[in-house]
Image: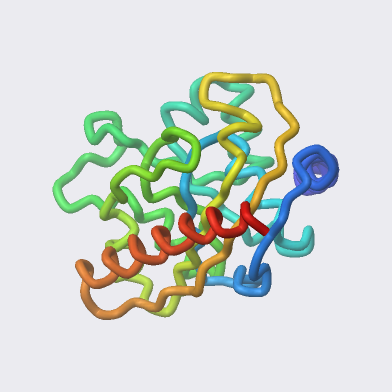
Amino acid sequence: MTRGLQILFFLAARIVVLFVLGLNVRRHEWLPERGPAVIVANHNSHLDTLVLMCLLPLSKLHLLRPVAAADYFLANRAMAWFSLNILRIIPIVRKPGERKDDTPGADPLAECHAALAAGEILILFPEGSRGEPEKMTALKKGIAHLAEKNPDAPVVPVFTHGLGKSLPKGSFLLVPFFCDIFVGEPIRWPGDRAAFMETLAARFAALSTEKTFASWE
């Protein structure tokens, strides 16, 4: 039953995404259709997760696992049920003191590793929290740890433009706004965390510049 509700929800979500927002997706073919893989994107709106999940076929929906903050998405019983059963998030506790397992050496990304080992596709926002529209903040290093332990999983950078204006932080009213999605070339683990972070930052910088040129076309 839950699977059916998930499909119905995302059918409705696709109508909103395609006809209200009018997405322009570049290099859609670089998005992974099988796991293990990680999609990483800039984070400006709660629409980000929904839109990214709508970019893949419904037949791949069961593979998608957004990584999301437990303190927000598990804040109450209704939100927790929706987040865990419809979005199928992997909840991450951002404050170490609130983790169930705070023993020394415990890996806060353990469930992410397990999902990748099961052949799933993670959706992750390496900035850690929502920022200003189209303005990226410093990337958290957790994505490098994830890539290091899962070197066979490509990391696909995606830059979204316009979602932060369609549903700004703190707003509950969807504003129709044409949105661009720029998919970058997948990154393979280079064997070094610093090199990985530099490559990822460079890919995001290039994608954010690309949207400037796209606006002139």
Q: Nearer the viewer, residue 214 or 159?
A: 214
Farthest left residue in view: 104
Query: Can you give x and y, in whole percent of width and height, for residue 88 in the image?
Result: 60, 46
Q: How many marks?
A: 0
Query: Measured from the top left, where is residue 93 in percent x and y?
Result: 35, 36
Residue in view at x 22 percent, y 30 percent: 97
Q: Position of residue 178 (x, y in %)?
A: 71, 42
Residue at the far front in the pictured view: 216
Image quarter hosting the N terminus: top right
Q: Is residue 43 above or below residue 97?
A: below
Q: Is residue 201 shown left or right of residue 8?
A: left
Residue 62 vs residue 100, the one in the foreground:
62
Give the residue drawn at x 43%, y 57%: 112
The residue positioned 42% from the left and 54% from the top of the image is: 111
User: Relative to residue 166, is residue 68 depicted above or below?
Assistant: below
Residue 119 placement (x, y as % from top left): 55, 70
Q: Is residue 114 left or right of residue 3?
A: left
The residue at 56%/63% (across/down) is 121
